[in-house]
Amino acid sequence: MWSLNTYPGAFNTEDGRGRLNAKGDTIIPPNYMATGNLSDGMHIVRAKNEKWGAYNSNGKLIIEPQFDDLWHFYEGVANFSLNEKWGFVNKKGEIVIKPKFDYASQFNNGFAYVELEGKSGFINKKGEIVIPIIYDPCRMTRME
């Protein structure tokens, strides 16, 4: 059933978009502008105030909508922006890398591409710079 649907479990009502689990139970109430597909055990949601948050796969709101942007969870964390700076939040809702970058991609193999002051490099999951932020930006760059 779900394999034919681009957005498994997504549904719309007059009040907004919500999500169902595979049993057909509502796990995200239909009062959001957008809901993301399950990724790394989490659904991201965009509230009517245009802030982003996240639910776990059981339908528990873990991250109150508070971020200006929030990407899907990958490798246990999601990149988010707040006040035009990017950081990372874990699946408990804890900010693990404070928003200090001009841009940050998702983690791939333990590393994330970041930009700061017009230059780019890579950080690890501790937020430590592992490839100096001295290179010209190229957002398609990933650590394969």
Image (cartoon, rainbow, N blue to C red):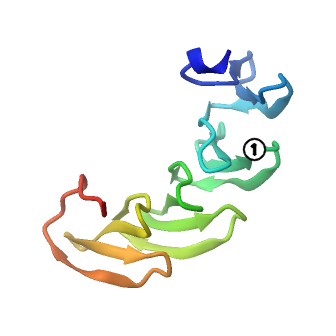
| Image quarter hosting the C terminus | bottom left
Residue at mark 1:
57
Q: In this view of the protein, which residue sits in the foreground, 103 or 128?
A: 128
Residue at the image position 70 percent from the left and 19 percent from the top: 11
Residue 111's place in the image compared with 79, above or below, is below
Q: Amino acid at mark 1?
A: Ser
**Left of 73 or right of it: where is 142?**
left
Residue at the image position 45 percent from the left and 80 percent from the top: 127
The number of discs equals 1
**Left of 68 or right of it: where is 85?**
left
Q: Which quadrant of the figure has residue 4?
A: top right
Residue 29's place in the image compared with 61, above or below, is above
Q: Secondary structure at mark 1?
A: loop
Q: Position of residue 132 (x, y in %)?
A: 24, 82
**Left of 100 or right of it: where is 47?**
right
Q: In this view of the protein, which residue sits in the foreground, 114 or 68?
A: 114
Residue 19's place in the image compared with 65, above or below, is above
Residue 100's place in the image compared with 107, above or below, is below
Q: Position of residue 110 (x, y in %)?
A: 44, 69
